[in-house]
Image: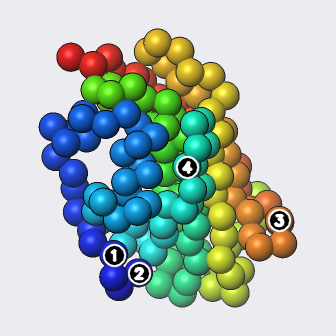
Amino acid sequence: MNDIAYGVVPLETLQQYDGLTFLRGLISGQFPAPPIAQTLGFTLNEVDHGRAVFSGEPQFRHYNPIGSVHGGFAMTLLDSALACAIHTTLAKGETYTTLEIKVNLVRPLTKDTGPVRAEGRVIHRGRTVATSEGDIKDASGKLYAHATTTCVIFPAK
């Protein structure tokens, strides 16, 4: 991840692209990756209409005081995947924000888990509300967490 540029894209730039095109630009390096990706060590790997996939590797630096990866790692990875799945459906000029997210942590992540993959999938895309679901699995397909989210869509101005 050392060759990746991190930063924030100005709103004016973001609004010049539909959601899928913008996210493909993040993957290709046309736009900088968000700073949170550097902080937690995850990347956006794949996007299609209504779908987004992130990957990351739980590490000791993500541990909480009780000896496992802090739940915030999984929650942030899922928030990113579920929200970006919705982002792929945005028309040029539309924006959105997360209204609610529900995460179930079904088994602990540790530094020995290895790489994990978070996939988000749109369930419903309306005019002003969208929902998506997703999960985190390891390389063998073992489930670690699953979630749903609701996002508010703001029309283009």
- Residue at (56, 21) in percent of width and height: 125
- Could you say which disc has been placed on residue 47 in the image? 4
- Residue at (67, 28) in percent of width and height: 123
Q: Amino acid at mark 4?
A: Val
Tag 2 near tag 1, CB within 8 Å: yes
Helix, strand or loop under label 4: strand
Q: Tell me if residue 128 comes above or below residue 105 in the rendering.
A: above
Helix, strand or loop under label 1: loop
- Residue at (79, 60) in percent of width and height: 143
> Pointer 3: residues within 10 angstroms few (<14), some, or many (20+)?
few
Q: Position of residue 89 (x, y in %)?
A: 49, 30
> Pointer 4: residues within 10 angstroms few (<14), some, or many (20+)?
many
Q: Amino acid at mark 3?
A: Gly
| Residue 85 placement, left or right of 38 | right
Q: Position of residue 38 (x, y in %)?
A: 36, 72
User: Mark 3 to mark 1: distance in Å?
Assistant: 28 Å
Q: Tell me if residue 124 comes above or below residue 77 in the rendering.
A: above
Identify the residue under disc 2.
1
Identify the residue under disc 3.
141
User: Mark 4 to mark 2: distance in Å?
Assistant: 19 Å
| Residue 88 placement, left or right of 58 | left
Q: Position of residue 18 (x, y in %)?
A: 37, 33
Identify the residue under disc 1.
4
Q: Nearer the viewer, mark 4 or mark 2?
A: 4
Q: Position of residue 45 (x, y in %)?
A: 54, 62
Q: Amino acid at mark 2?
A: Met
- Could you say which disc has been placed on residue 17 in the image? none
Tag 3 near tag 4, CB within 8 Å: no
